[in-house]
Amino acid sequence: MAEKDLAGKRALVTGGASGIGLACAHEFAARGAHVIIADLNADAATDAATAVGGESWAVDLADTAALDDLTLDVDILVNNAGIQRVAPITEFDPDAFRLIVRLMLESPFLLIRAALPAMYERGWGRVVNISSAHGLRASAFKSAYVSAKHGLEGLSKVTALEGAPHGVTSNCINPAYVRTPLVEKQIADQAAVHGIAESEVVEKIMLTESAVKRLVEADEVASLAGWLVSDRAGMVTGASYTMDGGWTAR
């Protein structure tokens, strides 16, 4: 039986209907939190919320103008929603670049902005930003994703500095490639841009920088998120925790 150390806490997880977000939702719910699943896919959000006994929020987080006046009454915020596009800069669709930055940088800013007042009032809060090894390192053909994740790292640190006097921590988790639908969708794009077979992408592209030659599992990321939102991590803030099989050790 999991310790119910998050009983009475409200947790919002974006992109919570699948992958890392869903794993985090299950981690928090098992420990007593009331979880809000925010996702673009309304049906998937409802199913996920039902599975964890929480609630769903069907929302297009890329529509950032609609978030300007948002207020959130949550204790835990996990900024996880994201997409990927793979193309050389010279061929990168400007609208796709803008979309990724809105969804993966502007949206986290607006959600943090909406959540901090209630966290400050209670004197306790946890912000976990699902970044990436690409928040610390660059890869070719991912200009928008790398730019957004690098920006998220800076946003997380500023949140940590401003939140510290109010009992609010903010940290990033930086995994390598995680076994999620987002990664699976990249395989065809990576094969095309690198001119190799799809069957070669995981070994030759995704795992080439990792010393540990396997994908990260979503529940491994969720376990780290679970520690970061606990009281035991109260002195951990402004940090970036790699879970990349040694990628950034190079």
Image (spheres, grey):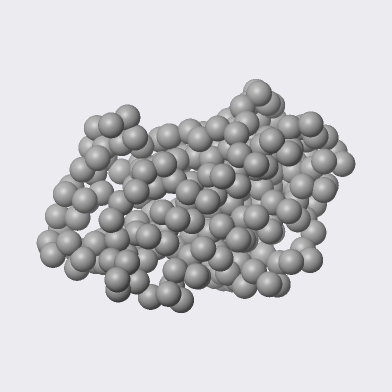
- In this figure, what is the number of numbered marks? 0
Q: Residue at x 68, y 72 (%)?
A: 65
Q: Residue at x 65, y 55 (%)?
A: 109
Q: Would residue 96 be visible to someone looking at this image?
A: yes
In this rendering, is residue 70 above or below 113? Answer: below
Can you give x and y, in whole percent of width and height, for residue 126 in the image? 68, 39
In front of the other: 80 or 142: 142
The answer to whether 8 appears left or right of 90 in the picture is right
Can you give x and y, in whole percent of width and height, for residue 147 in the image? 45, 55
In front of the other: 239 or 80: 239
Q: Residue at x 58, y 69 (%)?
A: 62
Based on the displayed image, in which of its 4 quarters is residue 29 positioned? top right
Based on the displayed image, in which of its 4 quarters is residue 122 positioned? top right
In this rendering, is residue 175 above or below 111? Answer: above
In front of the other: 35 or 189: 189
The answer to whether 59 appears left or right of 73 in the picture is left
Based on the displayed image, in which of its 4 quarters is residue 114 positioned? bottom right
Q: Would residue 54 be visible to someone looking at this image?
A: no
Can you give x and y, in whole percent of width and height, for residue 244 in the image? 36, 37
**Extreme front residue here?**
90
Can you give x and y, in whole percent of width and height, for residue 8 in the image? 78, 40
Q: Quadrant of the N terminus?
A: top right
In this rendering, is residue 171 above or below 80? Answer: above
In front of the other: 125 or 145: 145
Q: Residue at x 32, y 66 (%)?
A: 89
**Extreme right residue here?**
121
Q: Quadrant of the C terminus?
A: top left
